[in-house]
Image (cartoon, rainbow, N blue to C red):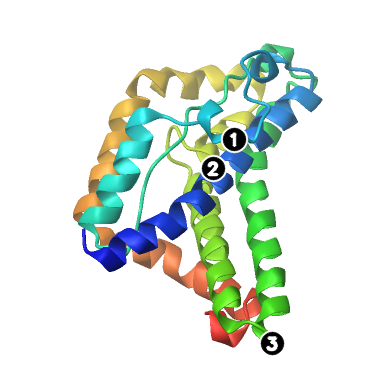
Amino acid sequence: MSRELIVSFVVMLPLLLLSLSVHEMAHAWSADRLGDGTARAAGRLTLNPLAHLDIWGTAMLVVTFAVSQGSFFFGWARPVPIDPRQLASRRWGETLVAVSGPASNLALAALAGALSWALAGVWVAGAQAVAIAFYLNMTLAILNILPIPPLDGWRALTGLLPVRHRATLSRFASYEQYVFFIFLALIVLRPEILGAVFGPPITAAADILLPGVAR
């Protein structure tokens, strides 16, 4: 990697780790509030990145960032353990837990946008640096809400089904890893697809939430 790319990665990595930690803790917190203490018992109700890191997910983050020359990244954290049987709401519990992760990233993106506006008039470089957190969290939110197993969007979709019908989708559980790696290969081999899916909603959100100097 070039020196500039290394600097970009060093700047981005702490923001990404924080964003992923908030995302995973949001899953753990929502499950805990709904009566399932599995994530708390596993030590996942924390912002400590070490509690959430996945070795392969972190390695893929570095690889995709380097291969794309910083134009995109893709990685993942360890899934938060959830026991749907312990959730207070059998009808909506799984969906609420699933969407809490992307929702937390949208909240962080909105917070980053507000901070960027606050800095724009006094420190342009600071506003632009904070905008990185906006783009990271918008990317994480959109990625995770896609209805592709094992992403949060798939979990949310499964949770919307009546309990008696969820077994139909659960039959695909053994194939999730294959679907995921096909999706991953598509992203690595055809990154323009990533831009086509993520670009329009992120650009639209940036036009609203970020000052012009930080877009």
Is 173 drawn above or below residue 195 in the view shown?
above
Please tell me which residue lies in front, 91 or 79: 79
Query: Is the residue marked by circle 3 packed among few (<14), some (14-19), or many (20+) residues within 10 Å?
Result: few
Circle 1 residue: 24
Q: Are marks 2 and 1 in contact (CB under 8 Å)?
A: yes
Residue at horizontal 43 percent and vertical 69 percent from the top: 199
Residue 25 showing in the rendered view: yes
Residue at horizontal 21 percent and vertical 58 percent from the top: 1
In space, the residues marked 3 and 1 are separated at their CA atoms by 34 Å
State which quadrant residue 61 falls in: top left
Which mark is drawn over residue 208?
none
**Residue type (three-letter) at the residue carrying disc 3:** Gly
Residue 160 showing in the rendered view: no
- Secondary structure at numbered mark 2: helix
- Secondary structure at numbered mark 3: loop
In space, the residues marked 2 and 1 are separated at their CA atoms by 6 Å
Query: Residue 40: x, y in percent?
Result: 69, 19
Residue at horizontal 57 percent and vertical 25 percent from the top: 80
Q: Are marks 3 and 1 in contact (CB under 8 Å)?
A: no
State which quadrant residue 4 falls in: bottom left
Please tell me which residue lies in front, 32 or 142: 32
**Residue type (three-letter) at the residue carrying disc 1:** Glu
State which quadrant residue 59 falls in: top left
Circle 3 residue: 121
Circle 2 residue: 20
Please tell me which residue lies in front, 97 or 116: 116
- Secondary structure at numbered mark 1: helix
Query: Is residue 208 shown left or right of residue 198?
Result: right
**Residue type (three-letter) at the residue carrying disc 2:** Leu
Closer to the eye: label 3 or 1: 3
